[in-house]
Image (cartoon, rainbow, N blue to C red):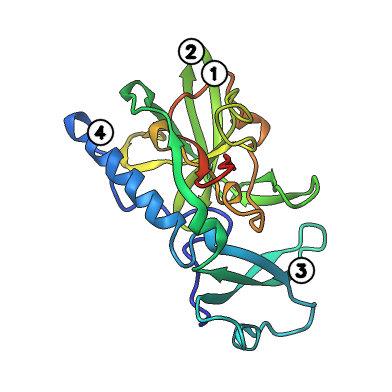
Amino acid sequence: MTDTPPPAYDHASPPTTAAPAGADARAAWEAWRQERRASVTAPTGNLALVETRPVARGEVPDPVAAAAGLPDSVTVTVVERTEPVSGAPEHFLRFWDAEAPAIHSFERIDTFPYDPAWVLDAAYTPVEGARKVAFEHIRDNGGTRDLVVPGDITLTMDGTAYTLSAFDDDGTLLLVFGDPTNGDSTYGAGRFLFVQHGAVTHGAGSDRVTLDFNRAFVPPCGFSDQYNCPMPPRQNRLHLPVEAGEKLPVSKGPGATEH
């Protein structure tokens, strides 16, 4: 019951398994799937978050006091956000339970079959200064939070040109995107994808990056309603169904359902 930081705030930790090209790509993707399962079922993984409790303004968050009397399976952490309207800092206590019912009932994350055709090359153009883009968040009732977008990702998919905004998530570019599969075969609020820096080739004013949609994943809010995930802005809503990556979490047991 210590104040150890969770693996992520309302996003997700970048994978440790790289995504190589060629014959090893499928094996690396299978390893990534196992890594994802381990991550979401961890003691402070997405399925373990059972409560996000606001701390009154002016009070100092005390995770040790909050954890007093709770089972040993519970970890309490502190998270700080910026209030969208006033810009003032706001604090929350987060309660993670390694024995949460969601972990015990979890069976798998349904995923599209691996398809190398969904590994796409794109151009990345850095933007001078700290440009911010407004992202609506799922628990903010239509409000937005400004996130730093350090550059533009441009590519053409099925004849349509896109300029995508990936924000800086602790030094890693995170793309929040939507497509016509959302609410049908995939999570309704969109999916996340880390932009692979290992595929960057520096050029004059522009870089190349790779978007491996086979590694598109369900955001944390698809596992617990206690997260406040960013949602895809208009420019990140694709017209082509992205039939790659994760679909939905599935629970086991009687009346098993997709989240």
Checking the image for residue 26, the label placed there is 4
Q: In the displayed structure, would residue 5 be above or below residue 173?
A: below
Direction from residue 196 to residue 241 in the image, left or right: right
Residue at position x 56%, y 42% from top?
256
The residues tagged by marks 4 and 3 sit, at their Cα atoms, a distance apart of 46 Å
Q: Is residue 62 above or below residue 201?
A: below
Is the residue under label 1 in contact with that under label 2 (CB below 8 Å)? yes
Q: Secondary structure at mark 3?
A: loop
Q: Label 1 is placed on what type of residue? A: Leu
The residues bearing labels 3 and 1 have C-alpha atoms spaced at a distance of 39 Å
Q: Which mark is residue 145?
A: none
Q: Is residue 88 above or below residue 246?
A: below
User: Which residue corresponds to mark 3?
Assistant: 88
Q: CA gap, disc 1 to disc 4?
A: 23 Å
Q: Quadrant of residue 181?
A: top right
Image disc number at residue 158: 2
In percent of width and height, residue 29 lies at 30, 38
- Give amino acid for label 4: Arg
Q: Upstream in the sequence, badge 2 or badge 1?
A: 2
Regarding residue 169, the answer to whether it shows in the image is no
Query: Mark 3 or mark 1, which is nearer to you?
Result: 1
Q: For marks 4 and 2, give the one nearer the viewer.
A: 4
Q: Earlier in the sequence, mark 3 or mark 2?
A: 3
Residue 206 as seen in the image, left or right of residue 101? left
**x 79%, y 77%: residue:** 56
Mark seen at residue 240: 1
**Distance of mark 3 from mark 2, alpha carbons?**
43 Å
